[in-house]
Each structure stands twice: as structure tokens, then as C-alpha cells.
Image (spheres, helix red, strand yellow):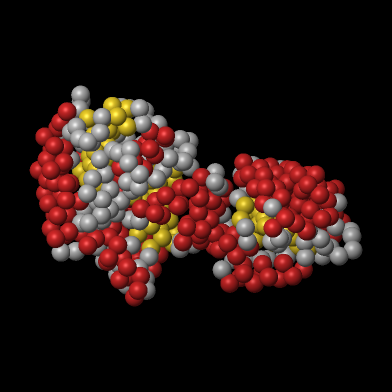
Amino acid sequence: MGPDFEEIDSIINARSLAIVGASSGPMKFGTLLTRSQLKMGFDGPVYLVNPRETEIMGLPVYPSLRSLPETPDLVYLAVPASRTPEVLEDCAAMRVKGVVIIASGFGDVGGAGKALERTVVEKARAGGFRVIGPNCFGIYNPRTGLTMLPGHDFTRTPGEVAFVSQSGGFSVHVPRQAQSLGIGFSAVVSYGNAADVDETDLVRYFTADPTTSVIAGYIEGTRRGRAFLEALEDAAGAKTVVMWKVGKGESSRRAVVSHTGSLAGSAQVWDSALRQAGVIQASGVDELCDVLLALKHLGRAPGRRLLLSGGGGGLGTYAGDIAEAEGLDVPMLSDETYAEMKKALARAGAVPGNPLDLGAPLIPLPEFEAALTTAARHRGTDILVFDMAINFAYDLAGEPGLELATDALIKARQGGGQPMVVVLYSRSCDHDDLKFAGLLGRMRWRLLEAGIPVYPSMPRALRAIARING
């Protein structure tokens, strides 16, 4: 796989770890990082280094890297930028494999910071190790229990998505939200200023990584535009790639330069280049997670033909407009399916067709099951999209009725028909209606576990379907 892969792999899959600047003091990055890592648990030894402390959170503290009983594979630096060069000298002397630099104050501040960043790279080259950062949150690897600055609550259950992020904050927001949707990660890397290991290196690494099937990223800019786009094109030829590219407006381009010292580039050029590379584009934490959720349960390019269903004619009309605006199709039902649907829904208010109007948010179970089964088996569409406002359905059938409706949705999906997407929400916003939040959460999790992606609104559901078909 080449030397670059081995070098980065020795960081992401490090077997031992040292935290320089570990602390027990309040409001310090060293304290937060140490607490996060110890709470997560790491499969190998964790060494804490701080010359001013002797014990932190029950572990002994060493005065320096050179006083450790062994050379760690990976060193996290939670010390001020000004102290970084001297610690890197120790890293070189001990022949560590990788270093993560948390502190800002390098290329992100310009001037002397840029010179300090060049010094970091020079010492890394001379010492034979690679650097993640500076100005980053680090690495999350659920297989080994390595975690990043505030990642104490991440799951240890691995998945198939790799996420690379120039932003520290989004490197935490995305996996936290995604894990609540049942999406797991092979690794997450916050790489900040990319003084050494950059987005190109990471995309190439995860393209070769056998534990990764989907590569996602938050990108502000790059110093190696052509190489990065070539890496994306190679990656998209082997795996699914989803990118959230920011810095498209004038104010955001200014923010990118001050945040990580990167060059954002033209919005039109980026849009065209990413499209030609075969990359799915997403914008924002919600949309990125929406796309990852759709990919998990529907796969890439599952089809654009939708069968829209729910309780109310207005819902179908609205959803149809959204679908067509997103480049999706809502074809007419076949004569055979229409006849079956008309027979199943022989009740006042119901309107067979596509969109399919059940006549109410929830109808008697036998009719509900028959309609869903017929819709799921329709061969003229690719995805069944079902809409339900649970507070209205609750008024009709109570919690037991909603549980039975969930059973029916799962049964229809598992009956060998087309994939299903459910839009689940409550229109009740009163303070005494919190019961709907708990009920919605339970229904959503049951559906997710059955392989049915759940979205809080029709626009988000249909936009995700459109993105994965792009």
C-alpha cells in the first residue's frame, strides 16, 4: 500500500499513546483531552506527561517524554504553540511514529505563526514522524478506543464511514449526530491547518483502507488543488465519497483563511470539479448526516422513481412538488397496482394513486397493512416514501396504534418489496406534549434497526434521496 499509507496507519491505528500537557486543572484542553481519552478507554498503554503534576485521574504522570518507560506510537500535544518545537525534539529523539498538535497559533494566525508551522514540518521531516494538525481535535478510532479532544461520548462500535474534517467542531458534531442515527465510523480525523498530513493524504489513505466503504469530509480549502481532486476521483472510483465544501461566499472565504490558513477557491470551480470527480455534495451537518443515512440503507443510486404516501391530499401535492424540484420522479401507478390499491382502500377519503392519500394519518390496521404491502410491491417505482404526523395519528389510535403502525411499516419493508423511507414528525409544540418526543424517538429507532431510514421532514428526505442518485 506504500509508505504514506503505513505512516498514516501507524497514527490512526496507534498501539500506544502519550498525552503531553495532560492536566487536572479546570478549563484546560489538556484536562478535557485526558478525561475524554481515559473515559473512552484505549486498548494500549496511555502515558500522561506534565512536569508540574505527579498523578492525574488515578494515573501516574511523567515529567517528560524521555522519562517514559517506552516509546509511544502516537503523541498528543496539548501544550501552547510556543512549547511545541522543544517537545518535537523529544519526539524525534525517541523516534515516535506520529504527533497530533492540538494548539492553534500557527499558520492560522499568519506572520510568526506561519514560521512556527514551518518549523514543525522541518522537525517532523528530520525526526521521521508525521504530524496531524496543528489547530485540530485529533483522531477518533472506535476499534482501538483512540478519541479526540471532546470525544468522550463516542461509541466504541465501529462502522464503515471515514470522516475527515478541517474543522475541529464539526469533527465532533457529525459523528455525534450520526451515531444517534445508527451510523458508525471506521475513523474520524480532525486535521486543522494540515501542516503535514492533509486532506489529499487522508483521502488516499481511506481509499486504501479496507475497513472504510464511505469517505466523507468537511473541506474549507486545499493547498494541493490538482492532487486533491485526483485523489477524490480515484476514491470515488472505488468507494462512495461525500464532501461538504465551504468557503463559497466572500465572507466565508475570508473566514477560511483566518481559520486554518487555507485557500478556499471559486465556488463554480469547486462545484464543477467535485461533480466531475463523482463526489456527492452535501451542505451542513444535517444534510451530511441525511446523505450518510440514505447511503447506509438505500445504497448509491437506488433510483429516482418515488411512490409518495401519507394521510392527506395536501401532503402528497407538497411532496410531489419537492420531488420534482429535486429532479426525482413521481410516476403514475400501473393499472394492476391501481386496481389493488383501490380494493385495499375502499373507504371514504382515501385516494389511490401516486401520490397515495390514505385519507387520514392512520387508518384501521388491516387497511393500513394492505395499502402498504401493495405500495411496497409496486414495480414501477424504486422507493416508497411514507409520511406520518405522529401527534395526529396518536389522537386517532393512541400509542398502541402507533406501535402497530410501526410493525406494519417494518413488515412491508421486510416483505421483499422496494426500499422504504419514512418521514416522521410531530406538529405539537406545546410544553406539555413532550410525550411525543419520546414516542417519536422510540418509533424512529425501531425503524432504523429494521433498515428503514427516518427523516424529520419531507424536504430533507427527498433531498437526501436526490443526492445519493446524483
Q: Residue at x 35, y 47 (%)?
A: 27
- Residue 200 visible at all: no
In depth, the one of 49 and 223 nearer the eye is 49
Q: Residue furthest top?
A: 69
**In this orientation, which residue lies closer to the viewer: 247 or 20?**
20
Looking at this view, name the residue that lies furthest to the bottom: 250
| Res 69 quadrant in image | top left
Residue 349 appears at what percent x and percent y?
86, 65
Please state the horizontal and vertical placement of residue 36, each as a whole percent of the image: 39, 39
Residue depicted at 41% across the width and 54% down the height: 170
Q: Position of residue 237 (x, y in %)?
A: 38, 52
Whether residue 241 sits left or right of residue 95 in the image: it is: right
Q: Position of residue 34 (x, y in %)?
A: 34, 38
Q: Left or right: 28 with respect to 336?
A: left
Q: As displayed, is residue 153 above or below residue 429?
A: above
Quadrant of the frame with the N terminus: top left
Q: Is residue 311 above or below residue 95?
A: below
Q: Is residue 292 left or right of residue 272?
A: right
Q: How many marks?
A: 0
User: Relative to residue 109, is residue 168 depicted above or below?
Assistant: above
Q: Nearer the viewer, residue 305 or 61?
A: 61
Inspect this view and state whether residue 259 appears.
yes
Taking the spot 29% from the left edge, 29% from the top edge, the residue there is 55
Q: Residue visible at 25% across and 33% down?
A: 53
